[in-house]
Amino acid sequence: MHCLIIAGGAVGPDNPLYSYTQGRPKALIDMGGRTMLERVVAAVQSSSHVEDVVVVGIAPAMAAGLHFARPVAFLPDQDGMVANMMAGLEWLARHRPDAQVILGCSADIPTITGRVVDEFIEACRPWDMGVYYNFVTRARLEKRFPDSKRTYSRYGNVEAAGGDMVLARIDVGLRNRPLLESLTAARKQPWRVAAVVGPRLLIKFLFHRVTFNDIEATAQRVLGSPVKIVLDGPPELAMDADKPFQVDMLRAEFAGGG
């Protein structure tokens, strides 16, 4: 399968990460002598399942000087996460017309490895659902990254954080752009996600009664395709460099030989 990496656009002066990026894309933040993007691409290219890699959000000229094991296709920023996603899916539909299922991830999870990528992909077998998403429990994430201070939500008796990797059918993404725009805008506020997908889920969320089964059933209804949640995959999938202290924490790990 092919991999689509969403690298995002430039970081503005009002963003807490601006001092780290100086206006360049967050994906180009240095992590132990390599950019986050180079580390993420190295991980997916070393997976036994991934063929071509497409990066959206980094113009080809900006990628000059980056080093990868194999050629990578670069598409410029389309001014929005969903717009970037759609540009990547449309590129794959045109240039890799036989592709049906893709791996998607963000460019700010620099601790992933080929083993991590393979573990997630294998957990999604037989790849016959429309979308596979992942959550990592608080216990597993904090065991690996005790100072991560990630945001968690409760699902039944489990506290978990969403990961930054998905396996999905290309056609499911292309036909659901309006819905994806709404969900992406609300992605870090679960109650807003619930408001988009229906009052029943919102009520259950308010009373801390939402389960992973509820999410799967609701997502299948709104997307028009089966959805599967992979629970407690590798913690690296949910450890993004989203805040300055997280960048510092991950840099310290790489400086220590991680």
Image (cartoon, rainbow, N blue to C red):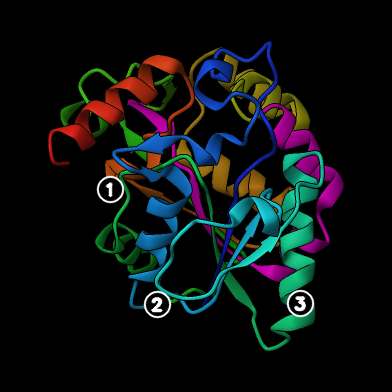
In the picture, the quarter occupied by the C terminus is top left
Give the spatial CA distance, label 3 vs label 1. 29 Å
Provide the residue designation for mark 3. Answer: 93
Give the spatial CA distance, label 1 vs label 2. 17 Å
Left or right: 168 as drawn, with respect to 251: right
Labelled pair 3, 1 in contact (Cβ < 8 Å): no
Q: Mark 1 falls on what kind of element? A: loop
Q: Crowding at label 3, few (<14), some or many (≥20) Cα neighbours within 10 Å?
A: some
In depth, the one of 146 and 78 nearer the eye is 78
Earlier in the chain: of badge 3 and badge 1, it is 3
Name the amino acid type tagged 3.
Ala
Image: 223 above or below 141: below
Left or right: 41 as drawn, with respect to 23: left
Provide the residue designation for mark 1. Answer: 234
Residue 138 visible somewhere in the drawing: no
Measuring 34% from the left and 16% from the top, which residue is drawn there?
149
**Where is residue 76 shown, x and y percent of the image?**
75, 53
> Which label belongs to residue 49?
2
Q: Mark 2 falls on what kind of element? A: loop
Name the amino acid type tagged 2.
His
Labelled pair 3, 2 in contact (Cβ < 8 Å): no
Earlier in the chain: of badge 3 and badge 2, it is 2
Q: Which residues are magenta?
A: 157-186
Measuring 76% from the left and 71% from the top, which residue is drawn there?
91
